[in-house]
Amino acid sequence: MQAKARFLTAFLPAAGIASLANALPYLLTRHAYQRDGQEVAGFPLAFHRIGGDCSPSACDNYDFHLAYFTADLSLALIFAAAAGLLAARTGKR
């Protein structure tokens, strides 16, 4: 039971950090497309992108890459699970 508690105490903060890492680019670039910039979401892969700094037809685009989103989600879960497993194995017994 203690191993499960140690796993959760490491898994949940690591999942939160991974979620924040994915949301931070979006929060920093939110509505940038209205001022000749790009709104971006995702880390390490940008799975959402809108806007641009050129003519409306060429750069006013909305891109959402499901494969990049899935890869970011998988990396976040792997990171959180690895942190949880490490905590469960190395904690006090």
Image: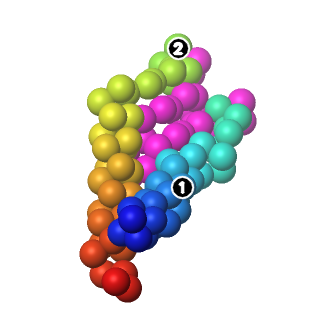
Residue occupying image coordinates x 33% and y 34%:
70
Q: Vertically, is 84 above or below 73? A: below
- The percent coordinates of residue 22 (x first, y second) are 50, 48
| Three-letter residue code for mark 1 | Gly
- The percent coordinates of residue 86 (x first, y second) are 30, 72
Q: Is residue 30 left or right of residue 12?
A: right
Magenta segment boundaries in residue numbering:
34-56
Q: Which residue sits furthest front?
A: 1
User: 5 or 14: which is nearer to us?
Assistant: 5
Residue 28 colored in magenta in the image = no
Which coloring applies here? rainbow
In terms of image quadrants, where is residue 80?
bottom left
Residue occupying image coordinates x 41% and y 70%:
2
Residue occupying image coordinates x 31% and y 44%:
74
Asked if disc 1 and disc 2 are in contact, CB closer than 8 Å, the reply is no
User: Which numbered tag is attached to residue 16?
Assistant: 1
| Three-letter residue code for mark 2 | Ser
Residue occupying image coordinates x 66% and y 46%:
27
Q: Vertically, is 51 above or below 88? A: above
- Looking at the rendering, in which quadrant would you find the C terminus? bottom left
Residue 7 shows up from this direction:
no
- Looking at the rendering, in which quadrant would you find the N terminus? bottom left
- The percent coordinates of residue 19 (x first, y second) are 51, 50
Query: What distance separates the C-alpha of mark 1 from that of mark 2?
Result: 38 Å
Q: Vertically, is 67 above or below 20? A: above
Q: Which residue is mark 2?
A: 57
Q: Which residue sits furthest bottom?
A: 92
User: 26 or 54: which is nearer to us?
Assistant: 26
User: 71 or 39: which is nearer to us?
Assistant: 71
User: Which numbered tag is attached to residue 70?
Assistant: none
- What SS does tag 2 mark? helix
